[in-house]
Amino acid sequence: MGVKRALITGITGQDGSYLADLLLDKGYEVHGIVRRSSTFNTRRLDHIYRDPHDAGRRLILHYGDVSDASRLVTLLARIRPDEVYHLAAQSHVRVSFDEPENTGNITGIGTTRLLEAILMSARDIRYYQASSSEMFGATPPPQNEHTAFHPRSPYGAAKVYSYWMTRNYREAYGLFAVNGILFNHESPRRGETFVTRKIARAAARIKNGLEKHLYLGNIDAVRDWGYAPEYVEGMWRMLQRDEPDDYVLATGVGSTVREFAEHCFSHVGLDWQSHVRHDEAYLRPTEVDSLIGDASKARTALGWSARTSVERLAQIMVDAELARLGASGREPSHVLPFADSRAHHEQTRSRL
Ligand SMILES: Nc1nc2c(ncn2[C@@H]2O[C@H](COP(=O)(O)OP(=O)(O)O[C@H]3O[C@H](CO)[C@@H](O)[C@H](O)[C@@H]3O)[C@@H](O)[C@H]2O)c(=O)[nH]1
């Protein structure tokens, strides 16, 4: 058998970049779909990017978008992948309340466009759907593959739709399509407006005297936070099974946002209570109170289990923020290249 080819939607995101690392290590040719933007959005891939003139390169990026069905058909015909990992989404829960229609179009219908394109390609493609613990929403923990869905956001509802479309293409057309139901998984590559990165970044900046306070919403929310590089390994394992099925990936340990803040601030010798303030702007119209996953099926069938504790995760993330600030204690210019984009980031971040 020749070199395996994988296509990743959402390759510029946290999970997409870790999955690209993993698949390149395993010898795959990795193709990724990137949205065209006037500013660079491939920073998480810089370390593996090769010039198109480099004959030996195995990472190939293509412009495209899951809102563009004909482009997906063209790309599948051109790339002829063995495996497709569908990670692209409008993935921010708070934002989905502001943009419910766009979230439905990208996070929901985007999945159908891709599944249809796979069907039209008439190729034997294995398909991974990035399903989410947000689908469980209001149903109390522990949650596993048999737990009823009760989504509490436009994002959660769009993910439930995509979950069922994936199962339907499996049942109706015999597609090798799996749902990975992943609980929160974090890393230094996490977007800055998700709570763990927001807290880790603030702890490092406050330690360096760049800020005094961190404003948060509901710090009583409970999440099951694992380390993202371990979770992409689980995605890959799901596609190597003989039969397609759905799996939960989680650590099985719940922590509050407050506890995560405690871990981050104590790692830099600070008391979180002196710096964290409440801002109701970060509350959501409906909240998901508690997500704690039961990943026993993945442990048995895939030999997968989470290895990094939440305390260690917090330390990894804070250390990465300290390293980003460097000896000068200021953010290096490549993190946010333009003064404008810094202002924009501050403005956007302040709402999430
Ligand atoms: N973002 C954010 N969240 C806050 C804040 N203050 C409190 N929170 C709470 O922190 C929790 C986690 O929020 P996020 O980090 O934004 O993640 P999420 O809503 O759990 O969604 C993430 O995990 C899902 C898997 O369960 C993913 O599907 C989703 O795409 C996203 O990655 C939520 O209960 C949120 O209300 C804040 O200032 N900002």
Image: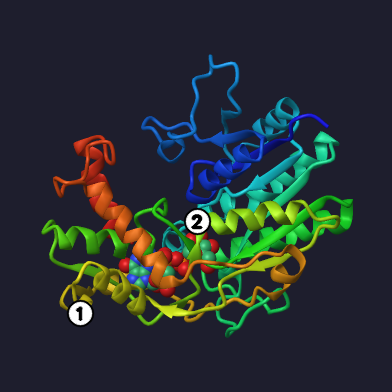
In the rendered image of this protein, does residue 346 appear above or below residue 75? Answer: below
Image quarter where the N terminus lies is top right
Give the residue number, with chain letter if any, for mark 2. 91
Q: Looking at the image, which residue is at 65% across and 31% down?
A: 71
Q: Tag on residue 307? A: none
Give the residue number, with chain letter if any, for mark 1. 273
Cα distance in 3D space between marks 1 and 2: 29 Å
Q: Position of residue 36 (x, y in %)?
A: 47, 31
Q: Position of residue 323 (x, y in %)?
A: 27, 49
Image quarter where the C terminus lies is bottom left
- What is the three-letter code of the residue carrying label 1? Gln
Q: Give whichever of discs 1 and 2 has the lower sequence position.
A: 2
As helix, strand or loop, the secondary structure at mark 1 comes to helix
Q: Is mark 2 within 8 Å of ligand 1?
A: yes
- What is the three-letter code of the residue carrying label 2? Ser
Label 2, residues with CA under 10 Å away: few <14, some 14-19, many ≥20: some
Asked if residue 154 shows in the view, the reply is no
In the rendered image of this protein, does residue 132 appear above or below residue 52? Answer: below
Q: Position of residue 130 (x, y in %)?
A: 63, 56
